[in-house]
Image (cartoon, rainbow, N blue to C red):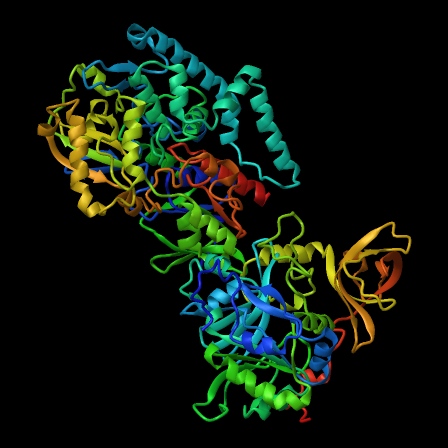
């Protein structure tokens, strides 16, 4: 089990049930903490791991993802008042990505909602949310239970992911459509009772991929089966660095990187609304009241002050944290870059940036201030940055059902 | 649903009636819906034993500004005072009672000339301070952190009012504003009895002891409401008669008042208030609903969290609304004798609060969920001025009792009798023959007040009246200017600025806000 018997001060970071298996693949012993767990940021090298996502398949341990079970007679009403999307449209077997806001319409967190049955949901979030969920539950008959430690989770992402899952005996996986989930079984190596898993066709890579949700005691069996079948097919475990590259290509935002939760900001004005993050499509103003609705309507009426946009930047040097200007002279600032990579697949220098309202239209040209380090000799360059549509990379295979059989 | 009303006032308490009257005078068609059979809410006169009637909660009229009484024409509408300018008698167990009233400190001067001078100074200071503070109570509080000129202007004018007191008074006001009343009394006065009496005024109706920081606010509040010259009066017929006069003022302004009509829900359509649903199932529509109910009842029970943001809802649940004040009513066969007190002095307000420490000790129990072993008492015998409240020759004693925690250990079913005993025993120290004269008792604990007057927590002021629940944070930011997050829904009860006591300013301020927004 995940809960360590050692006291917390001896075990400040927990280990996931995949940890020991992943260590066998780690050449670097490079860990980063994530939501109270020790996780791998890179196993061998970032590019190798990146290409396993885009060209084969990859395993990413997302057990630390915070998970809540939300159930009870008012579960649907509670969720609909909490999140911006209409959960009434989410039927059992479906998953939805959504955000939730504070009273001022600023994002507290984003996450996915799994409808398990009527008035029975699983909510996966980046940060712990119990305080806000409990505040939101005042007046609702709903039970909220954190189940993070009770569920081990593994993302299987990349073009051959369906084949990989079929290869380990998960039958029928090819029928799963994007944003659907279902219960599947996998034969156990060496016999014994089959492993029961929940599989969802979701992910953070913008590629064909699945997320596997299982009991912690089954984690190693699932890992072993996948790595055994994947051994000759370039399947690799990946760390958070490779994941960060693919999620930028897919145009997905990351808390603490592209926005700071309104529950954490200290400076006034650094909170971000879903409108500012380009997530207006997630807001359903017609479903009835939800927290932040009145503030968001006011923001719509006022017009956006800034918005997160995609940038295509001249050159090959990623514009990490670059300030953006209206002109090459750098006299007037117009925003800043939040995420940046050189995209090996798109062969473009990509960035996500928070940009002032006058310059958010696709095709606008801005100037990015990029610093080049040539053996400790620093140079400052002003390079053209063009506002382009997101996602930067959106292969048809991510949606095709059934997926192609490689 | 019919559509004959512009505004519905939920609850016919004194603030609801005042609000309705001013709305009607502002040209609105107004309906007041009161759950009980009588208007008035907690400002009510009730029969508690056959033939004995008494003001059920507050038993003195002292906070309603004279200007408001006049504006409403309450005398024309039947308000008569059975007694005015009641003296205060601070009871002493040994019989060395101390009697005073704001306009007449002669008696005090005889026993304690220094205290008489100090009290006179204090009253003069309060009178001057109220010039700066009364306007604060009479207006919608400003919002903080906005760019609106109206809010900035209001803040400036409050600051200017305080500055205009002059350097000495301004400094004194700022120095004492958040102080424990005990410390100020130690600075200014000598007599433990006088200090006890003034400390009682500061903590009456609160969950605070004289040594609690912020208790001086209540004294300033009382002074500000009464414009610096607090006069204790007894309406003829009890506080219920005031409510009757308010109802007549409302009716004559064109307000329709329906009693026995409890509201079950405030109705919302397309994120706007559209009316109310009665417990009977009947629906009445109106574009404006003003709630005289306390904030928790209004937002959580009548409106529902589904129409509110989660952060706001949480703030509402955090408002401190539990009452610590009980009321004891005694039906008396004859007038009791208080040791060392002439019969004429019984017409005054009798206080059992022989020292500030006595009150603090009484409060100690309440902090830990117990009732006070030796409670602090404010006693009136209204039948001396208003004999019609009791059968001929008999009397009523009305006692405000502190402290009686809402959630007393063991529960009030068990503690009701022992607490009644404690109060009678405490009174017995001053009036040994009292018990023999008692023919009936009624104890209203905070849960009784909650149930009978539909006040969540049974708090006299709807919400604790302290600096952290004052002005622009009363009851919570986002509803402190009478309007609420739901368009068309307003508050007008004691839970909003300026607060509780039978004062009526919340009702009038709310009406002005509604009319201003409609304009």
A298 or A323, nearer to the observer: A323
The answer to whether one can see residue B9 in this image is no
Work out whether B409 lies above or below B233: below
Residue B286 is situated, as x and y percent measured from the top left of the image, at 48, 53
Work out whether A285 lies above or below B94: below
Q: For residue A23, what is the image quadrant?
A: bottom right
Work out whether A287 lies above or below B479: below
Tell me how many marks there are: 0
For the view shown, which residue lies furthest in the right direction? A329
Q: For residue A326, what is the image quadrant?
A: bottom right
B436 or B34, nearer to the observer: B436
Residue B242 is situated, as x and y percent measured from the top left of the image, at 33, 32
The answer to whether one can see residue A135 in this image is yes
- On the rendered structure, is A290 left or right of A300? left
Which quadrant holds the C terminus of chain B?
Answer: top right
For the view shown, which residue lies furthest in the left direction? B436
Q: For residue B237, what is the image quadrant?
A: top left
- On the rendered structure, is A253 left or right of B458? right
Residue B247 is situated, as x and y percent measured from the top left of the image, at 37, 38
- On the rendered structure, is B403 left or right of B416? right
Identity of the residue drawn at 60% across and 78% down: A24
Identity of the residue drawn at 24% across and 26% down: B380
Identity of the residue drawn at 22% across and 13% down: B96
Which quadrant holds the N terminus of chain B?
Answer: bottom left
Residue B371 is situated, as x and y percent measured from the top left of the image, at 24, 38
B406 or B17, nearer to the observer: B406
């Amino acid at each position: 089990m995940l809960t360590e018997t050692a006291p917390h001060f001896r075990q400040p970071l927990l280990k996931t049930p995949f940890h020991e298996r992943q260590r066998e693949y780690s050449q670097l012993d490079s860990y980063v903490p994530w939501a109270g767990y020790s996780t791998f940021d890179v196993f061998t090298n970032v590019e190798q791991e990146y290409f396993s996502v885009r060209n084969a398949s990859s395993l990413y341990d997302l057990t630390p993802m915070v998970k809540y079970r939300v159930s009870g007679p008012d579960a649907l009403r509670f969720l609909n008042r909490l999140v911006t999307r209409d959960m009434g449209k989410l039927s059992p077997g479906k998953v939805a990505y959504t955000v939730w806001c504070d009273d001022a319409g600023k994002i507290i967190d984003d996450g996915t909602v799994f409808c398990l049955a009527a008035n029975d949901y699983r909510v996966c979030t980046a940060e712990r949310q119990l305080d806000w969920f409990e505040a939101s539950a005042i007046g609702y008959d709903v039970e909220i239970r954190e189940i993070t430690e009770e569920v081990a989770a593994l993302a299987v992402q990349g073009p051959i992911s369906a084949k990989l899952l079929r290869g380990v005996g998960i039958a029928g996986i090819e029928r799963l459509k994007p944003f659907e989930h279902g219960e599947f079984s996998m034969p156990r190596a060496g016999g014994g009772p089959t492993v029961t898993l929940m599989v969802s066709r979701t992910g953070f890579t913008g590629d064909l991929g699945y997320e596997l949700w299982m009991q912690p005691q089954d984690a190693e069996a699932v890992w072993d089966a996948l790595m055994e079948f994947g051994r000759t097919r370039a399947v690799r475990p990946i760390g958070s660095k490779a994941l960060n590259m693919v999620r930028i290509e897919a145009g997905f935002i990351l808390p603490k990187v592209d926005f700071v939760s309104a529950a954490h900001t200290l400076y006034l004005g650094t909170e971000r609304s879903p409108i500012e993050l380009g997530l207006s499509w997630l807001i359903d103003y017609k479903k009835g009241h939800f927290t932040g609705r009145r503030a968001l309507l006011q923001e719509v009426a006022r017009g956006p002050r800034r918005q997160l946009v995609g940038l295509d930047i001249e050159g090959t040097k990623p514009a990490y944290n670059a300030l953006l200007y209206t002109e090459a002279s750098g006299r007037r600032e117009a925003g800043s870059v939040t995420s940046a990579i050189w995209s090996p697949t798109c062969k473009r220098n990509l960035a996500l940036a928070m940009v002032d309202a006058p310059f958010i239209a696709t095709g606008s040209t801005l100037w990015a201030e990029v610093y080049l380090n040539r053996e400790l000799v620093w140079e400052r360059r002003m390079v053209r940055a063009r506002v382009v549509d997101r996602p930067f990379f959106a292969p048809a295979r991510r949606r095709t059902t059934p997926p192609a059989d490689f | 649903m019919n559509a004959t009303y512009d505004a519905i006032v939920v609850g016919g308490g004194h603030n609801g009636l005042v609000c309705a009257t001013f709305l009607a005078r502002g040209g609105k068609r107004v309906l007041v819906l009161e759950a009980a059979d009588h208007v008035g809410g907690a400002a009510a006169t009730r029969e508690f034993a056959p033939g004995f009637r008494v003001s059920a909660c507050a038993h003195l009229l002292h906070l309603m500004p004279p200007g408001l009484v006049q504006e409403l024409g309450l005398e024309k509408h039947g308000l008569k005072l059975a007694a005015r300018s009641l003296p205060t008698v601070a009871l002493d167990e040994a019989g060395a009672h101390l009697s005073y009233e704001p306009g007449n400190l002669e008696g005090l001067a005889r026993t304690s000339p220094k205290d008489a001078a100090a009290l006179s100074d204090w009253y003069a200071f309060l009178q001057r301070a109220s010039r700066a503070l009364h306007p604060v109570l009479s207006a919608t509080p400003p919002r903080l952190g906005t760019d609106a000129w109206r809010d900035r202007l209001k803040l400036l004018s409050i600051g200017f009012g305080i500055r205009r007191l002059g350097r000495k008074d301004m400094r004194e006001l700022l120095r004492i504003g958040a102080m424990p009343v005990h410390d100020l009394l130690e600075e200014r006065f000598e007599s433990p009895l006088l200090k006890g009496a003034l400390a009682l005024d500061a903590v009456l109706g609160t969950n605070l002891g004289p040594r609690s920081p912020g208790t001086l606010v209540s004294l300033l509040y009382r002074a500000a409401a009464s414009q610096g010259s607090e006069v204790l009066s007894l309406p003829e017929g009890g506080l219920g008669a005031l409510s009757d006069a308010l109802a007549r003022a409302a009716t004559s302004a064109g307000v329709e008042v329906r009693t026995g009509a409890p509201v079950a829900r405030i109705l919302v359509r397309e994120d706007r208030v559209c009316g109310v649903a009665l417990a009977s199932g009947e629906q009445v529509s109106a574009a404006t609903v003003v709630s005289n109910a306390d904030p928790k009842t209004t937002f959580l029970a009548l409106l529902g969290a589904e129409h509110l943001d989660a952060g706001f809802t949480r703030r509402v649940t955090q408002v401190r609304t539990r009452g610590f004040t009980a009321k004891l009513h005694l039906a008396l066969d004859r007038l009791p004798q208080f040791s060392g007190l002439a019969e004429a002095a019984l017409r005054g307000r009798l206080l059992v609060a022989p020292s500030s420490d006595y009150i603090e000790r009484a409060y100690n129990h309440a902090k830990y969920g117990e009732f006070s072993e030796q409670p602090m008492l404010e006693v009136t015998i209204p039948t001396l001025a208003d004999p019609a409240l009791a059968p001929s020759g008999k009397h009523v004693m009305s006692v405000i009792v502190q402290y009686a925690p809402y959630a007393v250990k063991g529960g009030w079913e068990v503690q009701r009798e022992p607490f009644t005993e404690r109060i009678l025993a405490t009174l017995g120290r001053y009036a040994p023959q009292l018990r023999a004269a008692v023919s009936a008792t009624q104890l209203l604990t905070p849960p009784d007040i909650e149930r009978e007057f539909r006040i969540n927590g049974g708090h006299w002021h709807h919400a604790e009246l302290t600096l952290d629940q004052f002005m622009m944070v009363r009851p919570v930011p986002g509803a402190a200017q009478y309007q609420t997050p739901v368009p068309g829904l307003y508050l007008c009860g004691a839970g909003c600025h300026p607060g509780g006591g039978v004062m009526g300013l919340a009702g009038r301020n709310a009406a002005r806000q509604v009319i201003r927004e409609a304009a």
